[in-house]
Image (cartoon, grey):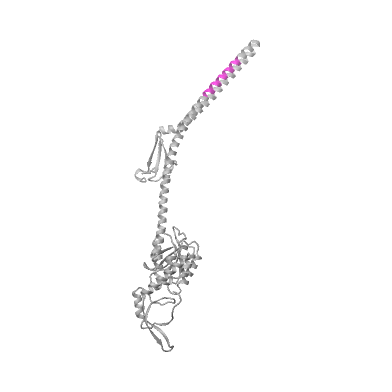
Amino acid sequence: MGQPLAVIDCALFAGNRPDIVREFAREGQVFQLQEGMTVRVQGRVSIWDRGGRYQLIVEDVDPAWSMGEQARKLRRLVDRLREEGVLEANSQLPLSPAPLRVGLITSRDSAAAHDFLEGLRDSRFPFEVFVSYASMQGQDTAPSVIRAFNRLLEIGGLDTVVLTRGGGSATDLAWFNNERIAGVISQVPWPVIAGIGHETDTTLPDFVSHTSVKTPTQCAEFLVNRVSDFADSIESLVVILQRSVTRQLSGAREVLSVNAAALLRTGVMVFRLERRRISGLYDILARNTLEKLLRCGSVLEELVHRLSRRQDAGGFGRRRRELHALLAHLLSSVRHRLAMASARLDGLNAALEAGDPANLYRRGWATVRKENGELLRSIGSIELGNRIEVTLRDGSLRARTDRIIPEGSRDDKCKQ
């Protein structure tokens, strides 16, 4: 406004004040003169007898002009702070998608505190609120709010701070149009949410804060909605992941089932080939052993025959008989051992045949696996409604359990 062109003392007498207060009230304001306040008045000039000085006797004050002047002062202050970079500082801080640790600056035992806290309590989310009380009206507003911010600086890990109060007159709310409050909001390390007054009210914190809403209740709604949106996005992501994993598991289960069946068929084939090979080796070994023994017997008999012609017939005849007896015993022992080995091999073959999965499947046996591919060995590891896969001789089938019958239980007492 610059320097005043002239100065004159003003006087507002008690008789005129009630009419001015009522006129301001009709405009939704509280008449409260403050230092530095610009007003438009109507009055008359008189001379103060004692001092011999001119003075202006105030008879009326224009509330509409006062409101307009407050708005103009606020606009000039906002423009200057924007040029200084103060307005954008807090809005550039990132706000957590789930702001659950909240600082609250408001007046003690106020309707604003009750409405805000009630809004958070009604949600399903675990908010933590750290309250720092401050004076929200009058000359102590700015220093008290600054002290409240400084107290919250001692608390670590806050996601955001809410500065809020309920509605009031334009004069009441004008205490927030303070450059010191704007300065502290621009310097704190967390996003500030301002909710001061009612729908039509605008104060300096609305321009400086990260987010501006109109009422304490809307402050709570803003936080609840933000956390709810984040929770919904997480739940959607979980559903997408579940579907993706289910599809991958289903495909892997089918591949595993095919590979298991192929491995089973390959194992049975290898088992049969090895059994035939061992049986063939046994036959070859038996034949070769008998042939070698017979050849050895023939050689010995020929040697004995030659010696018997050259030496004493009686002595060699006796030795020949002993040799024949020894040879007969040796052949008998070999045949006995071969018979025992053959019987043992037959027993092993029978056991292998009994354990051959293909033979088990042919006799009506089946293998049952759970949905994750694990073998089902007990009813204790299955529940009603679980999917199972049953492998039979010529393929497999999938089923869902609708009844579990424990061993020894009657069918009408089973789990259904």
Name the residue located 41 percent from the left edge and 52 percent from the top edge.
235
Q: Residue furthest front?
A: 5
Residue 359 x, y percent position in the rendering: 43, 32
Q: Residue furthest bottom?
A: 50
| Between 357 and 146, the one nearer to me in the picture | 146
What segment carries the magenta color? 282-301
Per the picture, the main secondary structure of the magenta-coloured stretch is helix
In this rendering, the count of numbered labels is 0
| Between 48 and 349, the one nearer to me in the picture | 48
Is residue 294 within the magenta segment? yes
Is residue 283 within the magenta segment? yes
Image quarter in which the N terminus is found: bottom left
The quarter holding residue 27 reads bottom left
The quarter holding residue 178 reads bottom left
Q: Vertical placement of 242 versus 111: above or below?
A: above
Q: Vertical placement of 109 versus 277: above or below?
A: below
Name the residue located 41 percent from the left edge and 55 percent from the top edge.
231
| Between 371 and 212, the one nearer to me in the picture | 212
- Image check: 159 left or right of 402? right
The quarter holding residue 170 reads bottom left
Question: Is residue 250 something that shows in the picture?
Answer: yes
Q: Residue furthest right?
A: 311
Question: Is residue 121 something that shows in the picture?
Answer: no
| Between 82 and 197, the one nearer to me in the picture | 82
Residue 122 x, y percent position in the rendering: 38, 62
Q: Vertical placement of 364 versus 229: above or below?
A: above
Residue 296 x, y percent position in the rendering: 59, 18
Residue 402 x, y percent position in the rendering: 36, 44
